[in-house]
Amino acid sequence: NIGIRVMIVTVVAVPLLFALSGLAIRYAAFASVSAESGFAAYAKALCRWDCSWYIDISEKGYERFPIANGSNVGRWGFFPLYPLLVAAIRSILPFPTILIATITSQALSYAACLVAWPLLGKNMRAYVLYCAFLLSGPFS
């Protein structure tokens, strides 16, 4: 049925368009104010807050005890699935961890949009708004 095909293409294309346009806008903003260029520098600039913890888990794993002189902090306070996924992809692809983590985050956000389609009752307006919020914002 042609209507079903159009719906499938729309459901796949909407988050892809938001992901690409959001990425282009954020990268253009980064490139206009940064002395560094390239997607790796852009990915590194996005790494704020808990990002460095997840990158460390992907590269070094978990430590057995809290970090010395770190006020009882450690990588053990963060969930393992995302860093394990990044580490698995990093073992296959020869790119920096931060770049792989950024691309993985974008891909998982795109997948979250696809999964949301039936959860939103197949309401196109709600789906477009959800995808716009998730993929167009200044999130890393």
Image (cartoon, grey):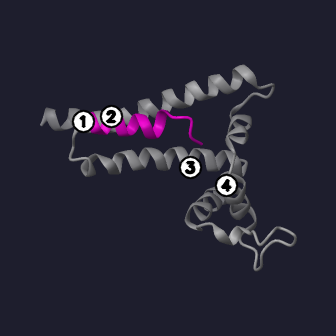
Label 3 residue SS: helix
* Quadrant the C terminus occupies: top right
- Using the numbered discs, state the Cα–Cα distance from disc 3 to disc 4 in whole angstroms: 16 Å
Residue 37 as seen in the image, left or right of residue 88: right
Q: Residue at x 47, y 46 (%)?
A: 109
Q: Residue at x 17, y 38 (%)?
A: 4
Q: Residue at x 79, y 28 (%)?
A: 36
Q: What residue is shown with label 1?
A: 124
Q: Residue at x 75, y 27 (%)?
A: 37
Question: How many other residues sit within 10 Å of disc 4, few (<14), some (14-19) or many (≥20)?
Answer: few
Q: Is residue 97 above or below residue 37?
A: below
Label 4 residue SS: loop
* Quadrant the N terminus occupies: top left
Which of discs 3 and 2 lies nearer the camera? The answer is 2
Q: What residue is shown with label 4?
A: 50
Name the residue at the bottom extreme: 64
> Which comes before the other along the chain, label 1 or label 4?
4
- Using the numbered discs, state the Cα–Cα distance from disc 3 to disc 2 in whole angstroms: 22 Å
Is 135 magenta? The answer is yes
Q: Nearer the viewer, residue 69 or 62?
A: 69
Q: What residue is shown with label 3?
A: 104
Question: How many other residues sit within 10 Å of disc 2, few (<14), some (14-19) or many (≥20)?
Answer: some
Q: What residue is shown with label 2?
A: 128
Q: Are marks 3 and 1 in contact (CB under 8 Å)?
A: no
> Which comes before the other along the chain, label 3 or label 1?
3
Which of discs 1 and 4 lies nearer the camera? The answer is 4
Circle number at residue 51: none
- Number of callouts in the render? 4
Q: Are marks 2 and 1 in contact (CB under 8 Å)?
A: yes
Q: Which residues are magenta?
A: 124-140
Q: Which quadrant would residue 46 be assigned to in this image?
A: top right
